[in-house]
Amino acid sequence: MKKHWDSVDEILDFAIKREEEAAAFYTNLAARVDKPWMQRVFEEFADEEKQHKAKLVAVKSGASFQPSKERVLDLKIADYLVSVTPTDDMSYQDALVVAMKKEKAAFKLYNDLASSTEDENVKTTFLALAQEEARHKLRFEVEYDDLLSDN
């Protein structure tokens, strides 16, 4: 990530590009798994990343976006897992690990982007998106924990 941005639009364009990449990542992950219910989970996440992009585009046009007052729990499961490389025949457990790591990185990215701007609206937007990414990570962590509990 760049250390110095020339404009707020440049920061927003960077974030928009990351959301496009995240949507493509989840769409690709959905295509790699063989269970229809797994495909739906990852397609839903692709849709959420597309919604994030739409929010960023709206902010770029002058809209504002506020974070929720509710704090998101962090189970920190992703902190203790080894990274997994996506494959066509990966297990659901491995797919969850990939997704948790991806959401953790997105959370960190938005926090870093928030600290890189003086524009309060953009800063608030990035903090709100960081919170949403933390919520995504939590959903994957809970699913991972439930999966291990069932075995």
Image (cartoon, rainbow, N blue to C red):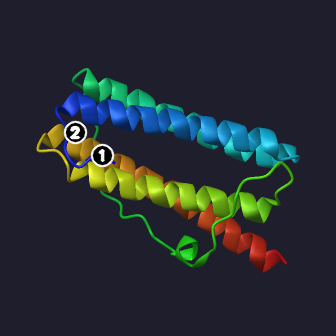
Say what amino acid the circle numbered 2 marks. Answer: Val
x, y percent for residue 132:
43, 51
Q: Residue at the location (85% across, 43% down)?
A: 36
The residue that disc 2 covers is: 122
Q: Is residue 18 left or right of residue 45?
A: left
Asked whether the beta carbons under mark 2 and mark 1 sit within 8 Å of each other, the answer is: yes
The correct choice, above or below, for 125 with respect to 115 in the image is above
- Farthest residue to the top: give it: 61
Whether residue 73 is visible to the viewer of this picture, yes or no, is: yes
Query: Which residue is nearer to you in this view: 115 or 135?
Result: 115
Q: Residue at the location (21% across, 45% down)?
A: 123
The correct choice, above or below, for 30 with respect to 127 in the image is above
x, y percent for residue 55:
38, 31
How far, Cα to Cα, is label 2 from label 1? 6 Å
Query: Which residue is nearer to you in this view: 84 or 134?
Result: 84
Q: What crowding class fits label 1: few (fewer than 14 Cα within 10 Å), some (14-19), or many (20 or more)?
A: many
Q: Is residue 18 left or right of residue 144?
A: left
x, y percent for residue 11:
27, 36
The correct choice, above or below, for 142 with respect to 15 in the image is below
Whether residue 68 is visible to the viewer of this picture, yes or no, is: no
Could you tell me which secondary element the residue under label 1 belongs to? Answer: helix
Query: Which residue is nearer to you in this view: 76 or 12?
Result: 12
Please give the count of numbered marks on the rendered protein. Answer: 2
x, y percent for residue 37:
81, 47
Q: Is residue 81 left or right of residue 64?
A: right
Q: Residue at the location (28% across, 42% down)?
A: 125
Q: Is residue 55 left or right of residue 149?
A: left
Say what amino acid the circle numbered 1 marks. Answer: Phe
The correct choice, above or below, for 57 with respect to 148 in the image is above
Quarter that holds the C terminus: bottom right
Q: Residue at the location (45% across, 39% down)?
A: 18
Q: Which mark is residue 126?
A: 1
